[in-house]
Image: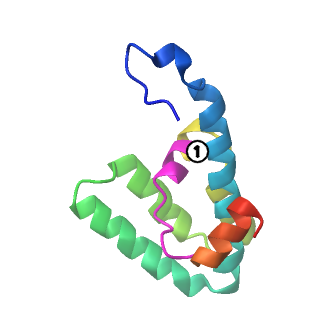
């Protein structure tokens, strides 16, 4: 893997392509997260707690906080919740990269999704 500095930037993988691969992996993880939350909506409480902690620590911007918080209120409207979490809008892809849905998937579930184990 090449460390990107101004001198060796040309030798690194094009950012757009690697970002697309990452976004696809993150999207697949969130697909499973949506399934788990559909089975157990009480998991939203831990997501909201994560959002509150990040907001208090200045780790999340207000717009992102509002987006996720409002979306969590739609958890019982599965279609809207799913579409909101899995949206392919660039802004939502960016939000998913800093997901508040930490701890929803087990390590085994993550490995299975990412590596097919």
Q: In the rendered view, would you say 27 is above or below 90? A: below
Residue positioned 56% across, 46% down in the render: 92
Q: As rendered, which of 31 and 52 lies closer to the eye?
A: 31
Q: Residue at x 42, y 56 (%)?
A: 66
Residue under numbered circle 1: 93
Percent position of residue 11, x then y: 54, 18
Give the total of numbered labels. Answer: 1
Magenta span: 93-105
Q: Residues within 10 Å of mark 1 (few under 14, many from 20)?
A: many
Q: Residue furthest left?
A: 57
- The residue most toward the right is 116
**Is the magenta region chiefly helix, strand or loop?**
loop
Q: Which residue is more in the foreground, 36 or 67?
A: 36
Q: Residue furthest front?
A: 1
- Residue 101 x, y percent position in the rendering: 51, 68
Q: Identify which residue is drawn at 45% across, 81% down.
A: 45
Query: Residue 102: within the magenta?
Result: yes
Q: Quadrant of the C terminus?
A: bottom right
Figure quadrant of residue 16: top right
12 lies above or below 47: above
Q: In the rendered view, would you say 56 is above or below 17?
A: below
Image quadrant assignment for residue 91:
top right
Q: Secondary structure at mark 1?
A: helix
Magenta span includes 42: no
């Amino acid at each position: 893997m090449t460390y990107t500095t101004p001198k060796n930037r040309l030798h690194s993988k094009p950012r757009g392509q690697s970002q697309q691969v990452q976004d696809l992996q993150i999207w697949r993880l969130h697909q499973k997260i949506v399934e788990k939350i559909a089975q157990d909506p009480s998991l939203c409480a831990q997501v909201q707690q994560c959002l509150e902690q990040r907001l208090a620590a200045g780790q999340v911007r207000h717009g992102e906080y509002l987006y996720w918080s409002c979306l969590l209120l739609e958890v019982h409207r599965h279609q809207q919740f799913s579409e909101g979490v899995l949206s392919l809008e660039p802004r939502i892809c960016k939000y998913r990269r800093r997901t508040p849905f930490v701890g929803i998937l087990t390590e085994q579930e993550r490995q299975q999704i990412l590596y097919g184990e």
